[in-house]
Amino acid sequence: MAENKTQPTPASVDAFINSVDSPKKREEAFALKKIMEEITGEKAVMWGPSIIGFGEYHYKYASGREGDFLITGFSPRKAAHSLYLLGCMEQKFESLFSKLGKYKMGAGCLYINKLSDIDLEILKQLIAESHSFMKAHYPTK
């Protein structure tokens, strides 16, 4: 069975953030790191070359495929910050998303161009809800 390509690495999170080209994106990445560490109580860890994760859970599909992935995290991509809030992809969170501000959704990702486009307090609620949901529904490490 194929192994998940995105795995935790020993690479430095701060060194990765410091390598981000845009000074503004870099500043926002450090802010997101601080917010996520405070809310989740988890230490930031690099997952693959460009994702910063907080916590780890184990999943198993009906097909038998299983693996481990970050509970929540983000990547300061050139176009937008990609936030991995896997526990918030359910309809019950629509009321929070309606108050968030300017964002786009993808498969398991929330895309935010810049933090000033959104309500940070709502984002903090989404991070907390996502983290709690994932810890309640999946085995964690």
Image (cartoon, grey):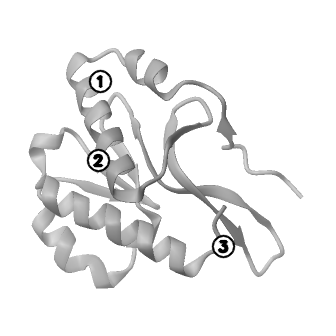
The residue at 33%/57% (across/down) is: 39
2 or 1: mark nearer the eye: 2
Q: Number of callouts in the render? A: 3
The residue at 29%/24% (across/down) is: 26
Residue 140 x/y as whole percent: 63, 67
Question: What mark, if any, has residue 26 been given in the picture?
Answer: 1
Mark 1–mark 3 distance (CA, rounded to whole Å)? 32 Å
Q: Which amino acid lies under the numbered mark 3 shown in the image of this protein?
A: Pro
Residue count near mark 1 (Cα–Cα under 10 Å), binned few <14, some 14–19, many ≥20: some
Q: Secondary structure at mark 1?
A: helix
Question: Compared to 113, does 57 lie above or below?
Answer: below
Q: Earlier in the sequence, mark 1 or mark 3?
A: 1
Q: Quadrant of the N terminus?
A: bottom right
Residue 118 x/y as whole percent: 13, 51
Q: Quadrant of the C terminus?
A: bottom right
Residue 21 x/y as whole percent: 34, 14
Mark 2–mark 1 distance (CA, rounded to whole Å)? 14 Å
